[in-house]
Amino acid sequence: MKPTERIAYSPITERAALKLPGGARIAVWVIVNVEEWDIDQAMPRTVLTPPAGGSPMPDIPNWAWHEYGNRVGFWRMLEVLDRNEIRAVLAVNGTAVRAYAPIARAARERKWEFMGHGYTQRNMQKVENEREDIRKTTEALAEAAGGKRPRGWLGPGLTETWETPDLLSENGYDYVADWVLDDQPVVLKTRGKPIVNLPYTQENNDIAMMLIQHHPAREYFQRAMDQFDQLYHDAAGGQARIMALVVHPYIMGAPHRLKYFRMIFERIRERSDVLFWTGEQILDWYLKERPLGRSEARPPD
């Protein structure tokens, strides 16, 4: 099924009111991506290029750069989230919950949500058997979460095949976050039960800012606050907004960046009408407001 066949165009100005409980304007969800990079493969991203070019293996400097995040950076970020009483969403590879078991344990103890992020950290279009990859990921995360199956999915690098939403729905997933095209949840058609897409972000994302656009560390804070201010304004008319903050321990968990991650929560916490929710909390609220099959269109005057 083509992407344009999965979702109809819907301008946000023509939708029925969508309101959060307690008069809140925005629900913010924080997604912490924890991945395992295979030392036997070319590294997914690099901070240093080798002197003679190419993709050497083992690529020690770039593997170690990423590994620092799981050994040190994650725990810095965890302290910030604990201090601000935020339950995050752990987007994690199926292999990573075993390779970095203390991280999975810390997330489970804090009742974080586990979100599928592929069995290994590679393009889903290069996975030999996508259905099997989803199944193995689901089983690994359910085990790490104490028996609770993941309800949400984020493709590595937001990658999907033509079949991904269908396969996720058939494997019991309720939401996906790959379709970054709205500030509210939207429903995607599948060949079976529809699946909800939750608003994610490509721009309030530390990979985009730090590794691709090469901004200074403070850009993460500045852009997050600019986005928050506009979404807060947009939501004044009874159309709630969802804001995602996306981080990776090897990036925002670095010593020179962490304070800008902390500053975001110190600033947003000044507002009483903002909710910090997990993905499944956002999903359950949305399905209560918009049961599957009910139109989101504004009723006629």
Image (cartoon, rainbow, N blue to C red):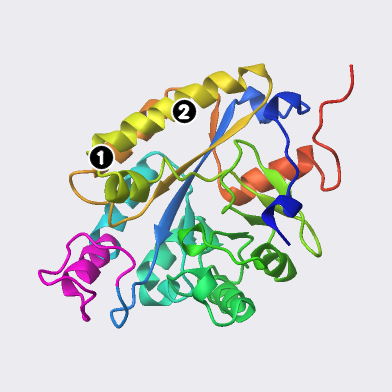
Q: Could one spot residue 149 in this view of the protein?
A: yes
Residue carrying label 2:
228
Secondary structure beneath dot 1 equals: loop
- Amino acid beneath label 1: His
Give the x, y percent position of residue 120. Answer: 45, 74
Q: Residues within 10 Å of mark 2 (few under 14, many from 20)?
A: many
Q: Residues within 10 Å of mark 1 (few under 14, many from 20)?
A: few
Give the x, y percent position of residue 294. Answer: 86, 41
Tell whether position 299 is magenta: no
Residue carrying label 1:
215
Q: Residue at x 22, y 38 (%)?
A: 216
* Quarter where residue 235 is shown: top right
Q: Residue at x 26, y 67 (%)?
A: 67
Secondary structure beneath dot 2 equals: helix
Give the x, y percent position of residue 36. Answer: 37, 71
Q: Could one spot residue 272 in this view of the protein?
A: no
Q: Residue at x 18, y 48 (%)?
A: 255
Of badges 2 and 1, nearer the viewer stands 1
Which portion, as a residue range, is magenta? 43-69
User: In the picture provided, is 65 more to the left or to the right than 180?
Assistant: left
For the C terminus, give its image quadrant: top right
In the image, residue 147 above or below residue 114: below
User: In the picture provided, is 103 more to the left or to the right than 60?
Assistant: right
Magenta segment, principal secondary structure?
Answer: loop
Q: CA distance from mark 2 to mark 1?
A: 19 Å
- Amino acid beneath label 2: Phe
Mark linked to residue 105: none
Give the x, y percent position of residue 184. Answer: 64, 37
